Image (cartoon, grey):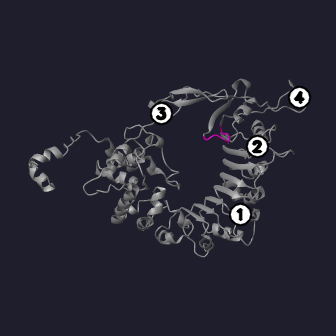
Amino acid sequence: MGLLDKIKASPRRSRRSATPATEPPTPPRSTGHDATSKLPRPVLVRIFSYVCPHTLDYSYDTSEDSMNDGCMLCDMRDLAHCSQVSRRWFAAARALLYKNVRIDPVHYCEREITLAAKRKRRSFFDRNGDPIDVPQLRLELFMRTVRESQDLGKLVLSLRMPYMTREANKTNIARTISVLPQLRYVDLPTGLFSDESSCMTLKQELIASCPDLRRMSYRRGAEGTFARLPEAPQWVNLEKLEITGLRIEEGTLRKGVAAFRNLRDLTLEDLPWLEDSAFAANTNWPLFLPLEKLTIRDTPQLTATGLVSFLSPQRNRLALQELTISSTGVLPSTLHRILSAAPGLSNLSIIQEVSRSFPQEQIAPMKSQSLKLLHYEITSESDTPGLPPVASSYYTYLISSLMSQCLPRLRDLYVRDAQFPDTLLLTPPPRLFGGGEDGPQLRGGLIQPLNVYSKGLDELEWNFTPYEPNPSLGQGGTRTRPVSFQEAQLSRSWGGEARKSVLVGNGFGGYLAVPEDDDRPKSSGGSKRSSRQDLWR
């Protein structure tokens, strides 16, 4: 029987009889008082921001680095439903919907399982059953929306998308950002940062249409573009700059960085020509601008002398808050020089592989009145059988700085030594010279709570051990003790005033608290938020 015969054989239904079966029933109208009618618009916007939290993500991080715990697509759907309630809600919700836009590949909840099954079904018009590129389709829909409505394009401040989407849709991205004049951040293909020919049209569109961009990278291959920055400045409001793999002279580096007057975050990576002289005061080169965050990686010629020279101007010394040094010539034994030159430093990260033990001569302890977070990740390649690891002497120096009360505001400590929490607990307090076993003691030891995150070389996850001073020893207590988090007073998102947990030993005499599954946070749609790994099990 052919298709036409099947249609003739099927009974026909009149439109009038089919309408009640296909149309959904009209929802009853509420006759109660609208309590939100008297709320100011900023308050209404604030309420809607809890429906879709990622709309308040004003950071300049990529789509992969700025992901939240919930299902962002479901949150955006809920906010879109709120915009359909009334005219007042529409104006407030629309401003949030198009402020910080995310194009995610999947739903991070149970809904994705149902949608994925529907996408695999073959229809009458798609006999091949080719898979649908969902994020590409969402990008095309968003592009059409902002190009048809110029007012919506002026609301967009950031646009994030998956890695494969931005690599395979350069033309669509260029057409989209051409109508986003207020754009501050957008996920871009990696070839744009290296001046690849396939991305030149996109880059020219970015320069012409997005003058308020706040983050940009220059990588190997873009030496010519970076050298022309003093004569042809771009994005004068840039706040975050990344320079990776450029083969340029020190003067070119200083002049190019000085072209961004509002720079706050600078990353220098894989610069083998970078030496201490690049940070020294030189009348022929412009001075480095005051930075709030400085990250330096894979620069073996740079030592602590160069960083101290960078911090010699008072404006630089007071502005710097975060410093990350990884695989550089800065030795851990010279950290005390950097800390003394940066009185406002709150976060410090040093990641270094050492081959020799800590120097035997007298080294001043690390001392800072402002440091709150310290990543002290010192590792060594191989150890001699029968001898302690080379890196252990560096952690001994760290413990002496802690016990000397030179870091009174430190709250979080990350170390790459699995035995560090146990060593810290068993470390004897410092004593006065000439004092015996029962002699007078120096007022040393931890005087503040400290969260220690430790990880061995063969471990993937951080082990958490909280410590607090022993109250029985008074204000100058010289011993610490691990803390149990049973009945800890934490946020309501864990299931009430007190978190319900299961106590698990952490191997050092302390305990770890594992929240119950029923008390984990839920999405605004009411469904339980699952981890991304659970969706593909």
Q: Which residue is mark 1?
A: 272
Marks 4 and 1, how far apart in space? Answer: 50 Å
Q: Which residue is mark 2?
A: 391
In the rendered image, the quadrant that contains the C terminus is top left
For image coordinates 83% across by 29% down, the residue present is 441
Q: Which mark is residue 392?
A: none
Marks 1 and 3, how far apart in space? Answer: 50 Å
Q: Which of these two is toward me, 522 or 22? A: 22
Q: In the rendered structure, which segment of residues is drawn in magenta?
A: 453-460
Looking at the image, tell me whether mark 1 or mark 3 is earlier in sequence order.
1
Regarding mark 2 in the picture, which secondary structure is present there?
A: loop
Marks 1 and 2, how far apart in space? Answer: 25 Å
Looking at the image, tell me whether mark 2 or mark 4 is earlier in sequence order.
2
Q: Position of residue 44 (x, y in %)?
A: 38, 47
Q: Which residue in the rendered view is the most extreme toward the front?
A: 1
Left or right: 97 in relation to 455? left
Q: Quadrant of residue 138?
A: bottom left
Q: Which residue is mark 4?
A: 435
Q: Which residue is mark 3?
A: 492
Marks 4 and 3, how far apart in space? Answer: 51 Å
